[in-house]
Amino acid sequence: MFVDSHCHIDFPELRERLPAVLAAMRANDVTHALCISVLLADWPNVMAIADAHPNVYATVGVHPDYEDANDPTEDDLVALAAREKVVGIGETGLDYYRIEQFADRTCGWQRTRFRRHIRAARRSAKPLVIHTRSAAEDTLAIMREEAAGEAGGVMHCFTETWETAKACLDLGFHISFSGIVTFRNAKDLHDVARRVPLDRMLIETDSPYLAPVPFRGKTNEPAYVKHVAEGIATLRGISVEEIAARTSENFFRLFRIEDTAA
């Protein structure tokens, strides 16, 4: 049994063939999926999918990539997080990848948005789904300043160093691995995957992006999350069944979801 802890099946590439996507999940023993919010304008699509399918859950939040997005207030996020099937806040965080050299001058809005999401998560008692790219130092600083550990959560699609992973673990967060962990050249990430405690690990697809080997370069989907588990199992020298069981247990515990088959 596998769980995809982070996917975007509301995106057009997957929503347009959603029955086939869900059928492929079942055929590959992927029992649950968490559909992640990135824009409030699209959040109704996320909720429609979660409400229609008992094994799909949702988050609410605005991704750091969208500078001109409609920003929810802290109160807005708290109210939306109270909806049935909403189990987390995010994805939120910092992404300096395309503007790294100008981050101090241009990314104040990202940091303000991130703080707002953390505060809403603490008030809602819902875990955070955090995205960080080329911004680990600032991400960790804000997590500490805003007491993000009170809400807890997951560092999704983790690609940072072991030192960053350790700092996140120390704050009480989980580490989630995507298909990148199956890439041959991701040596530093392989080291992290070997060292993260099994009781703090999640797996995800981040679909429709980042398809794992052997589907690299193709449209990703939740059914492929088992290949992420297989990659980690190979790195750690343990069975894929153990990775599946432990990461699924962690998912249900973190997001306070009853562990039932779809």
Image: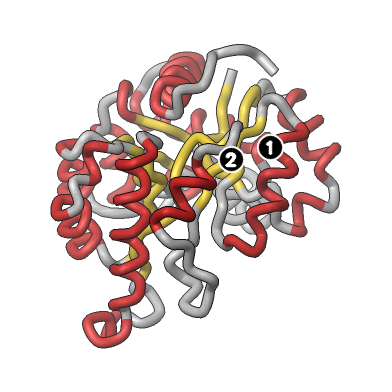
Residue closest to the far top: 260
If you read the primary sequence from the N terminus, does the residue marked by circle 1 or circle 2 appear first? 1
Residue drawn at point x = 19 percent, y = 55 percent: 140
Residue drawn at point x = 39 percent, y = 18 percent: 238
Quarter of the image with the C terminus is: top right
Q: Position of residue 40 (x, y in %)?
A: 59, 61
Residue drawn at point x = 48 percent, y = 55 percent: 76
Disc 1 is placed on an element classified as helix
Density class for disc 1 (Cα within 10 Å; few <14, some 14-19, many ≥20) is: many
Q: Which residue is mark 2?
A: 58
Quarter of the image with the N terminus is: top right
Say which of 124 and 181 sits in front: 124
Disc 2 is placed on an element classified as strand
Residue drawn at point x = 67 percent, y = 21 percent: 29
Residue 70: mark: none
Determine whether, in the image, residue 107 is placed left or right of residue 98.
left
- What's the colour scheme? secondary structure
Q: Marks 1 and 2, how far apart in space?
A: 6 Å
Residue 50: mark: 1
Determine whether, in the image, residue 84 is placed left or right of residue 78.
right
Q: Position of residue 33 (x, y in %)?
A: 61, 33
Say which of 109 and 79 sits in front: 79
**Quadrant assignment, res 210:** bottom right
Position of 48 relative to 61 (above/below): above
Amino acid type of the residue that numbered disc 2 sits on in the rendered structure:
Ala
Amino acid type of the residue that numbered disc 1 sits on in the rendered structure:
Ala
Q: Is residue 196 visible?
A: yes
Q: Position of residue 165 (x, y in %)?
A: 23, 44
CB-based contact (under 8 Å), mark 1 and mark 2: yes
Position of 1 relative to 124 (above/below): above
**Quadrant assignment, res 150:** top left
